[in-house]
Each structure stands twice: as structure tokens, then as C-alpha cells.
Image (cartoon, helix red, strand yellow):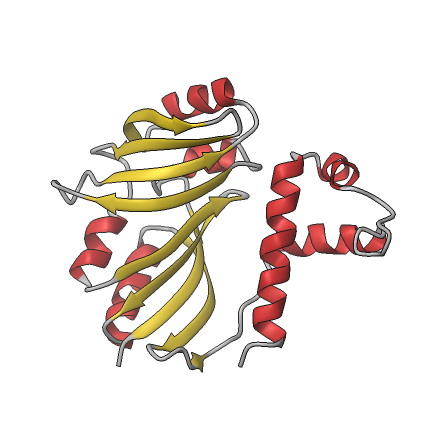
Amino acid sequence: MSLLAAFEASSPALVLGPTLEALPSIDVELERQYALDPDRPIAFCRLRYHDRDGLDRTLAADDTIDEFERIGGSDDENLYRLQRSETDVIGAYREWVDAGGELLECRGSDGSWEVEMRFPDRASFSRYHEFLASEGVSLELQRLADGDGRRRGPRPALTDAQREALTLAHEHGFFEVPRETGLSEIAAQLEISNQAVSERLRRGQAQLIDDQLIE
């Protein structure tokens, strides 16, 4: 039976790792990925960040990508075509393809990637997990489930950033009716953008709902 795995991964040697570390408030959503050369996959990512010029400068300095091109979007949200560099990058794409894995969802923010994948069985996932660990990737397993969605192992956990944002929002009355504070006040205390706060609160609430209400 296939296995669903959700985990958090972080390393400056993962694709866009330096960008995620340099811009903690950025939100990256991988829309699709393909490879004519498995060692240099091409990714289409939706990047949300308030300073497009600053984003482009950071991407230009990111050694994990050779080429990037903005192909659409607006000031705060842009679609980029990215190609991985040839050296000094963890070959995660080739490894999970060889293991028979399927990437279901991949989002990056707060210095790490949140990933959901499907593998043919537990052994194939273990192989991929061990590969990442051997490459020095920091891993936090959030959920394992059978292919039909039944849980195996621990329930999802909030990230530290999500927990901090939710706690601060609660303490300052963000969830009261009417609200006693707004996103800008929470963002100022966390020293991140309004958009980043909104993403952390949204993901944190979704994680809590999944944890407490979804069997």
C-alpha cells in the first residue's frame, strides 16, 4: 500500500535554501517541476514577497539555481521559472524519482520547505528520508498515512514560527470579535511582513484543525 508523508526540511544546500534563509518572510509555492536532465530540474514557483527588486537580487546570489526568469505576476506575487545549478546542491529530485515518489505539495517559508509526498511503500520513503538525513538536511516528520489517508505515526505539529504567531495573535486579541489588534501590529512585533503573518496564521490554524478535528 502506498504511503503519504508530510515533513519539513531545511538546508542551505536544498534548492532555494539560501533564498529561504535570507528572506524569512517569503512564501514559495512550487506549482510544477520537470526535468530533461534529472540533475538539473526546472521548477515553476510562485514567489510572494513585498520587494521584487530585493527578491531578484537574492535569487541572483543564490548558488543553488543557475537561471531564473520572471514569467508573470504582480508586485507582491510573481511566477518564476527556475533551473537548479549543477554543483553544490542536494540531488533530491533524482532521489525521490528513483524511489518512485510523487510530489503532491511543496511550499517554502521561514527558512524551510513544507513537503507532502506519496511513495509506493514505507521502504521507499525510508530510503528517501535516509538520503536527505545523510546530506545533512534538517528534517521534522509531521505525518505518515496509508494511501487511503489513515494516519500512521505522530499527528502534525505546529512549527515554532506558527506557534509564535498564533500565540501572539491570541494574546493581543486578534481572534476576538471585534478584533482588538490587526495584522500590522503582529507583524511589527515579529519583524516580518503582513503577508508573512497572514500565511503563518492560516497554516497554523489549518494544522490545528487537521490535528484536532480530522480523524
Q: Is residue 150 above or below residue 88?
A: below
Q: How many marks?
A: 0
Residue closer to the observer: 87 or 106: 106
Answer with left or right where residue 151 lies relative to residue 132: right
- Residue nearer the viewer, 91 or 195: 195
Q: Residue at x 53, y 68 (%)?
A: 156
**Seen in the image, is 124 located left or right of residue 6?**
left
Which of the 4 image quarters holds residue 203?
Answer: bottom right
* Quadrant the N terminus occupies: bottom left
In the picture as drawn, the residue positioned furthest to the left comes out as 36
Along the line of sight, which residue is nearer the eye, 34 or 17?
Answer: 34
63, above or below 57, in the image:
below
- The x and y percentages for residue 64 are 32, 33
Q: Quadrant of residue 63?
A: top left
| Residue at 61% from the left image edge and 53% from the top image edge | 202
Identified at 62% across, 38% down, the residue is: 195
In front here: 83 or 30?
A: 30
Q: Residue at x 55, y 77 (%)?
A: 214
Q: Does 75 sit above or below residue 91?
A: above
Q: Is residue 83 left or right of residue 60?
A: left
Residue 171 image offset from top left, x and y in percent: 84, 54
Provide residue 209's location: percent of width, then percent of height: 61, 69
**Residue 77, how many percent across, how many down?**
48, 32
